[in-house]
Amino acid sequence: MMKINIKKKFILIFFVLITFYVYAAQPELKKEKINIKMSDGTELASDMYSPEGADKLPVILIRSPYGKEQYYKIAKALVENDYIVISQDVRGTGESGGINIAFVNEAKDGFETLQWISIQKWYNGKIGMWGASYCAYCADIIASLNTGLLNSVFSISGGTNLGKSLMPGGAFHLMMNMTWLHFSKIHQDSSLNKYNAADLMNVIPLINGFSMIGADKDINEIGHFIGSLANTETPQNTAFLHMTGWYDFFNVLTFDLYDEIKSNKGITNKIIIGPWYHDQIYRDNSKVGDEDFGSEALMGLKNLTPIIIQWFDYTLKGKQNEIANQKDVNVFVMNKNRWEQYDELPPLNSEEHNLYFSSSGSANSSKGNGVLKTINDYITNSDSYIFDPLNPVPTYGGANFHFFPDNLGVKDQSKIEERNDVLVYTSEALNESRKIIGNIKIELYASTEGVSTDFTAKLVEVQQNGYCKIICDGIKRIPKLTPGKIFMIEIELGYTAIEILKGNKIRIEISSSNFPKYDRNPNTGANPLFAEEFNKVKQTIYYGNEYPSKLTFRFVK
């Protein structure tokens, strides 16, 4: 039998005692199942986690349609740091009663849950909410009620202006809406597995695709509800930490809410933006499409959990910790692949920059002569293409729905740019690396043969090896037009942070479709959901002194 010398034996005992002390110091987790009754009598099933024998503590509420049990690890970590956590199934999901209509009841049910918490003996006067995606909306919409009950929110890929993501630029985010509703309906009826979301997006008329999964009424309800959110108030008394990714399809919601709150200087309003796609924050993965952003981009639950605890310690307990001492904006700058901090977004040390469209009259495809110039042309000119909704420009990469991993994040646009219905405008090669941080927009002068149509735009970095890297994209739907009349539109491409490297070029693609990310416009004035007839139309882009079509962004000094 092997003998252990005294020194080794002492070290072994020491580590056993330390391990015992550490685990003994952790509060024992107590779990209770409770039903919280709403004013209409509906009971919402909730799991309450607390330290054994706890008195009055801050409360963290998590509301979700995806099953309250999956947040156990986060709840456990918070309880071990002296919080009470309530994880709740929203109305009509999990073990909760009532009928679920996406988004519609979350403000009322969430507020009534806060009221219930506020009269419990273990409530210490402080409530925070945490959530991602739909769960983040549940928190954000309650904060907008400004009741004074909600002190702090950690919102991942969330916001209140749902139209920004569900109907960006007035178009229908088909890839997200169809897939998410299909996914949700499968939880209610597993036989709907026989349908493929990608096939449903190609059904004509499109409403039949939604009908096949029993979601046609949901589309109508959600559409009406989005309109009602136009009057949503800006949170006035809730501290916010936003987190999202450059390739997250919900990031426009996050940026919109951040911008709204930024106007109120009295609110703590911080934001963290990585290079991630939707839900990548939970994964130990730094690859986004074709590009691996390296170890600095890794998040995962092991890195996320300490940030959650630090945030609530700072805003609910007043601790001056690491997150308290960081600047309000923490962004991952792509190509440099490192984090940088700023006081606000866009950074104060940034300056607006314009690149103007120009060509010799044929910017069609990457073989054309479209250019981006720092000085606008004096002579007006134009480029044209035929938009055929039944032969749309295919979606390839970008901030897309995360259920399609092969069509997500950084992708080479070279094949897309071979099409004649894509106008391509390219800058000269940069003579030095330049950092772009902030919102990107296109000001476009155009005309159409249609009575309603769409215009799309995409920002691309052309690398020296020929790879055409998608950065961000946008769309603008014009519901009513006079054929042949020139008009001006703005296309919002959202925010980014990227350093365009020396020798690379900036490129803009202009077209009228990005399918199935966005639904197809029939060009007839008919609602795309119900359209059965689709017309080809000639689209014309104008530029020059009279019609200064341009790309606007911000260089950081």
Image: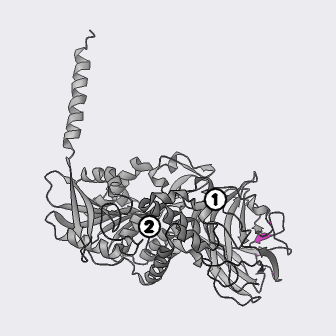
Of residues 31 and 285, the one nearer the viewer is 31
User: Which region is colored magenta?
Assistant: 362-377
Task: Say which residue label 1 marks.
Answer: 397
Contact between labelled residues 1 and 2, with CB atoms less than 8 Å apart: no
Q: Position of residue 506 (x, y in %)?
A: 71, 64
Q: Secondary structure at mark 2?
A: loop
Hey, what amino acid is under mark 1? Answer: Gly
Task: Say which residue label 2 marks.
Answer: 158
Q: Position of residue 496 (x, y in %)?
A: 57, 64
* Quarter where residue 413 is shown: bottom right
As drawn, which residue projects farthest toward the top? 1
Q: Position of residue 209 (x, y in %)?
A: 58, 69
Per the model, the C-alpha gap separating discs 2 and 1 is 22 Å
Hey, what amino acid is under mark 2? Answer: Gly
For the point 60% across and 57% down, the residue is 408
**Along the horizontal axis of the image, is 21 left or right of 445?**
left
Q: Secondary structure at mark 1?
A: loop
